[in-house]
Amino acid sequence: MNITLNGKPYAVRANASVTSLVSQITGRELASNGQPADGQRLGVAVARNSEVVHRSHWHGTALAEGDDIELVTAIQGG
Amino acid sequence: MMTETTALPAGLGTDTDRLVIDGVALSSRLIMGTGGAPSLDGLGAALLASGTDLTTVAMRRYSPAEKGSLFQLLVDNNIRVLPNTAGCFTARDAVMTAELAREALETHWVKLEVIADEHTLLPDAVELVVAAEHLVNRGFKVFAYTNDDPVLALRLENLGATAVMPLGSPIGTGLGILNPHNIELIVSRASVPVVLDAGIGTASDAALAMELGCDAVLLATAVTRAQNPALMGAAFKHAVAAGRLAKAAGRIPRREHALASSAMEGRAEFL
């Protein structure tokens, strides 16, 4: 299944959840509430088709073909 | 009449002279930005030397190639994070960016920045007002980066901004405070904290901001692009504290003619 991740084409397995995508990209294991299993802060957020998906909903949100996903974090600025 | 005092009033210039924003007492009146630092290690050293308690970050696409985490650096050093909406040209983008920042960094504080164009990086007043209203309604604590316009500053305060942050001069220019009169006017009418933001070039600019009555100063480039960022961070720490003390101490009035500080009476006479 193909989605767009941060402006580029990206392939995920059918019905993958937002949690599995975030975990895959960040290399962090995530609990079902979206918090990292290592107890540290995760520091990323997800927008799906221009709507923020709250962390507590990541697990229950399945990606769909053609979804436009933005995965953002804090960088130097301001 | 002047009264003689020996002690500083109410712990001024000490750790108890804290800026309270949204119920949080900040131990430093220097808010740092993080843009322009060549490395995370160097940035960390500069932030520590500056003594800052609150530091801005930008929100951008996650890159797995990025080494180290700025967010983790701030968390590890107990520095509160103030996400910004840098790079947003419209209220819509700024609101979306603020929502993502709140989600990613678990804070409802946001430095609202809506700029008009890349050449001046000046705030777009109309989009800024629209975005501020949306964000306040969505429960954000809005630190509004604004022009040095007393009317706009008051408008933002009335919309519910938590702090107003007028620029000294355009971002990154280091031109200092180009309109001190307007900054004083903003301060005199504001009932929320006023933070001088942008344009600071060196320590004396920050001291001046505090002497004009600002509650805090926000800067990045002046430290991150200094030849020795950690040393400049320390310089700003002292400058902000010195300006704060000078404002409380009350400067002498300006005069047109000289005023001798030594008495003329009792001089020796040479025949």
Image (tube, coloured by chain):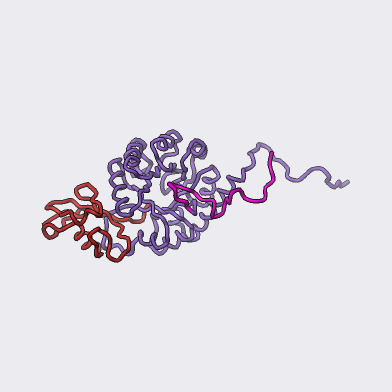
Chain colours: A red, B purple
x, y percent for residue A24:
21, 63
Q: Place residue A35 in its image quadrant.
A: bottom left
B264 up-or-down from B107: above or below: above
Residue B94, quarter of picture: top left
**Magenta: main secondary structure:** loop
**Which percent across, then down, holds residue B196?**
47, 45
Quadrant containing the N terminus of chain A in the rendered view: bottom left
Is B196 or B80 nearer to us in this picture?
A: B80
For the point 61% across and 48% down, which residue is it?
B9
Left or right side of A15 for B262: right
Residue B62 pos. (x, y %): 27, 57
Magenta region, residue range: B1-26
For the residue pair B105 and A55, the one nearer the viewer reads as A55
Residue B20: in magenta span: yes
Residue at the spot x=51%, y=49% of the render?
A: B206
Seen at 31% across and 39% down, the residue is: B134
Residue displayed at 59% across by 45% down: B248
Q: Position of residue B2 (x, y in %)?
A: 68, 41
